[in-house]
Image (cartoon, rainbow, N blue to C red):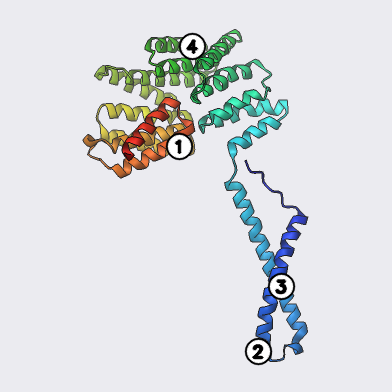
């Protein structure tokens, strides 16, 4: 990350002085020429001439200095590496500040697709209480590590350790979250039985969560996981699709007060419609999700863009357009490069390459 240059009073004077010299020469020459053309004897008005030249030099130099400072400020803001900056804040924070900031910053890094930086938080060694240690094990060393495509077995072991600690400390929200993560990993590995088993455990721990808001949020996540599970059935039939629709609707309703989580449902609902060959409805849902995800979640923005790319590449949709398909596929590829899980990104990449052959 580029560090922002602090413009001191001395530095500003140096910049101003540099402008003054150049402007003085230019203004002096111009005024001199005009003076001779108009008066023919500029020496008669030497005092007025000097006053005009100096006044214009100062005014023009000040204007150039202001423009310089404004451009520097704009450049500093547009070039900010916010994820690296937030990590640096945690790195420099006191123990009390770290405890206050850690979870909010970690949440931001998750939503905007920076699993590698999430993992680095643990290396700071500032997790002093059991809850932060559990978060590190389940989310940072566990799920974020898995998202990065790193050592899957190490990620699983970390999540399992975090779940045990969570249960021991009565932190059932994190125990449920850990089991849900393990369920997702099992599903992506094609281990359907383990996926269901971990989802059942997650539901069991969810029932023991005392805080109503956390319980509703976790139940909504379980509903969404179930919708994905039915949608991914190898022998997909109408019954599976009905179950997928039911759980996707329940998840959407559960997240009605949580936009950052509710946007996760759009791509699932869109893919359900895609499987039902209801292309117009699928396009509407993907487009709604695509718009709703802007500035909220990069991973879901990429998923909805990919959904639109698939529709515009489907002959049966009646909306076939290689140009549109390529546009959305390219965006999904760029947006999802770090935000998507490895297997999701590979699918998008393969689709994009197929379009560009």
Answer left or right for 230 relative to 110: left
The mark closer to the camera, 2 or 4, is: 2
Please tell me in which quadrant of the rendered image residue 118 appears.
top right
Cα distance between the residues tagged 4 and 1: 36 Å
Cα distance between the residues tagged 1 and 2: 64 Å
Cα distance between the residues tagged 3 and 2: 21 Å
The mark closer to the camera, 4 or 1, is: 1
Q: What residue sits right under mark 4 in the picture?
A: 207
Residues at marks 4 and 3 touching, judged by CB atoms closer than 8 Å: no
> Along the polypeptide, which appears first: circle 3 or circle 2?
3
Label 4: few (<14), some (14–19) or many (≥20) C-alpha neighbours in 10 Å: some
Q: From the image, which quarter does the N terminus lie in?
A: top right
Label 3 residue SS: helix
Label 1: few (<14), some (14–19) or many (≥20) C-alpha neighbours in 10 Å: many
Label 2 residue SS: helix
Please tell me in which quadrant of the rendered image residue 96 appears.
top right
> Along the polypeptide, which appears first: circle 4 or circle 1?
4
Instruction: Please report the residue visible at 41 percent of the width from the left and 10 percent of the height from the top.
Output: 194
Answer left or right for 180 relative to 356: right
> Along the polypeptide, which appears first: circle 4 or circle 3?
3
- Please state which of residues 19 and 71 is positioned toward the viewer in this rendering: 19
Residue 38 bears which disc, if any?
2
Residue 24 bears which disc, if any?
3
**Residue 63 pos. (x, y %):** 66, 65
Residue 335 bears which disc, if any?
1
> Along the polypeptide, which appears first: circle 2 or circle 4?
2
Residues at marks 2 and 4 touching, judged by CB atoms closer than 8 Å: no
Cα distance between the residues tagged 1 and 3: 50 Å
Instruction: Please report the residue visible at 56 percent of the width from the left and 28 percent of the height from the top.
Output: 116
| Residue sticking out furthest to the bottom | 40
């Amino acid at each position: 990350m580029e560090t922002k240059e602090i413009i001191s009073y001395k530095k500003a004077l140096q910049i101003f002085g540099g402008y003054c010299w150049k402007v003085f020469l230019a203004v002096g020459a111009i005024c001199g020429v005009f003076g001779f053309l108009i008066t023919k004897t500029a020496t008669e008005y030497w005092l007025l001439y000097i006053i005009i030249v100096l006044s214009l030099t100062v005014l023009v130099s000040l204007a150039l200095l202001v423009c310089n400072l404004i451009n520097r400020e704009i450049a500093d803001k547009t070039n900010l590496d916010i994820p690296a900056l937030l990590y640096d804040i945690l790195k420099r924070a006191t123990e009390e500040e770290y405890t206050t900031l850690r979870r909010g910053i970690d949440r931001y890094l998750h939503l905007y697709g920076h699993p590698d930086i999430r993992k680095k938080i643990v290396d700071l060694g500032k997790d002093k209480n059991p809850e932060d240690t559990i978060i590190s094990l389940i989310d940072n060393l566990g799920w974020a590590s898995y998202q990065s495509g790193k050592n899957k077995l190490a990620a699983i072991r970390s999540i399992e350790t975090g779940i045990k600690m969570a249960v021991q400390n009565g932190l059932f929200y994190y125990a449920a979250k850990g089991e849900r993560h393990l369920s997702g990993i099992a599903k992506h590995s094609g281990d359907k039985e383990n996926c269901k088993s971990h989802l059942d455990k997650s539901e069991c721990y969810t029932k023991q969560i005392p805080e109503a808001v956390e319980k509703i949020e976790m139940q909504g996540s379980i509903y969404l996981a179930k919708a994905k599970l039915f949608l991914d059935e190898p022998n997909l039939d109408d019954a599976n699709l009905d179950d997928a629709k039911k759980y996707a609707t329940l998840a959407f309703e559960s997240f009605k007060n949580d936009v950052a989580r509710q946007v996760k449902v759009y791509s699932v609902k869109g893919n359900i419609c895609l499987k039902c060959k209801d292309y117009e409805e699928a396009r509407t849902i993907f487009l709604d999700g695509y718009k709703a995800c802007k500035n909220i979640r990069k991973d879901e923005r990429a998923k909805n863009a990919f959904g639109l790319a698939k529709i515009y590449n489907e002959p049966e949709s009646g909306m076939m357009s290689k140009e549109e398909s390529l546009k959305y596929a390219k965006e999904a590829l760029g947006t999802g490069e770090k935000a998507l899980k490895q297997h999701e990104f590979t699918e998008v990449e393969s689709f994009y390459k197929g379009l560009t052959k």
